[in-house]
Image (cartoon, rainbow, N blue to C red):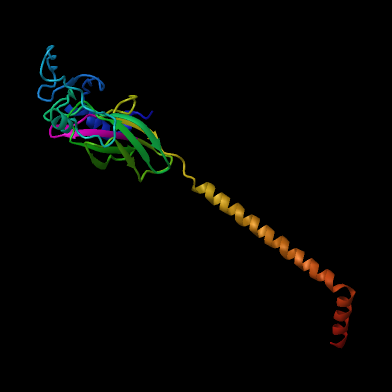
Amino acid sequence: LLGSSHWPWLRAQESSPLASPTPQHDLGTDYYSYEDPFTPDPPEMPGSQHPLHKPCDYHHCRHLQPACAELREETGCLCPGVSGPDVPPEPPQLGIVHVTESGASLHWCAPSSTVWEYRLMYQADGGHTIAGPIFNSTFRMAVLGGLHPSTSYLVCIMAANRAGASPTDDGSRAHGPCRMIRTLASQLPYAYVAAGLAAMFGLVVVAALTWHFVLRARRRQGPMGEEAEALDNQYE
């Protein structure tokens, strides 16, 4: 793991007031109303004329997941308890990251916060921070391209709303917003070696065939060919 001294952007994040991590709610429980996210709805009394509200079909890790507020307006379901837009979001949970020679694909889970957009940030070891694409609040997957082979990167996904952006870390947490990755080695040298071997083999085959036909032509000439050559030399 690379030391934090290699990441000036990370140090700037840690020194900001947004860098202090806040405890996340359990992503699978606590379905509360948006009007009062910290107070559960009172249970329905027996014999009530209104049916019990059901949790919304909302999953924090589902790609292209509509906002729970929209689902609540349509069906009257209950959403997980979240912080409002006047509170900076908690950090998303970065999951599986697949790397290639020149890119990486990321998947994350939304925090229990009001999120307006997601921002992808990355930084090579010893390099400067690069702001990647911005995604709307329904996204949970992204593909990052333009990376260099055999290079270490700190990749972070940040949630943002009008109050600010979520904090980052050094990529050491298993389910944090950042991850240290290393791209695969370039396969081009192997391709060049294979092409060179194929060309060499082709030249050997051509040379062998040429020598074969030359020997065959000489054998066909035989004694007659030698006598004709001697007569030509005599007349000259």
Instruction: Find residue 236 and report its image quarter.
Output: bottom right
Instruction: Find residue 32 and report its image quarter.
Output: top left
Residue 125 seen in the current view: no
Q: Is residue 25 above or below residue 59?
A: above
The residue lying toward the viewer, choosing from 192 and 33, is 33
Q: Is residue 125 magenta?
A: no
The residue lying toward the viewer, choosing from 28 and 131, is 28
Q: Is residue 162 magenta?
A: yes
> In the rendered view, does 215 fall on the left or right side of 32?
right
> In the rendered view, does 220 fall on the left or right side of 37?
right
Magenta-drawn segment: 154-167
The residue lying toward the viewer, choosing from 15 and 201, is 201
Q: Is residue 110 above or below residue 209?
A: above
Q: Position of residue 225 (x, y in %)?
A: 86, 76
> In the rendered view, does 168 fall on the left or right side of 208?
left
Counting labels gives 0
Q: Quadrant location of the N terminus?
A: top left
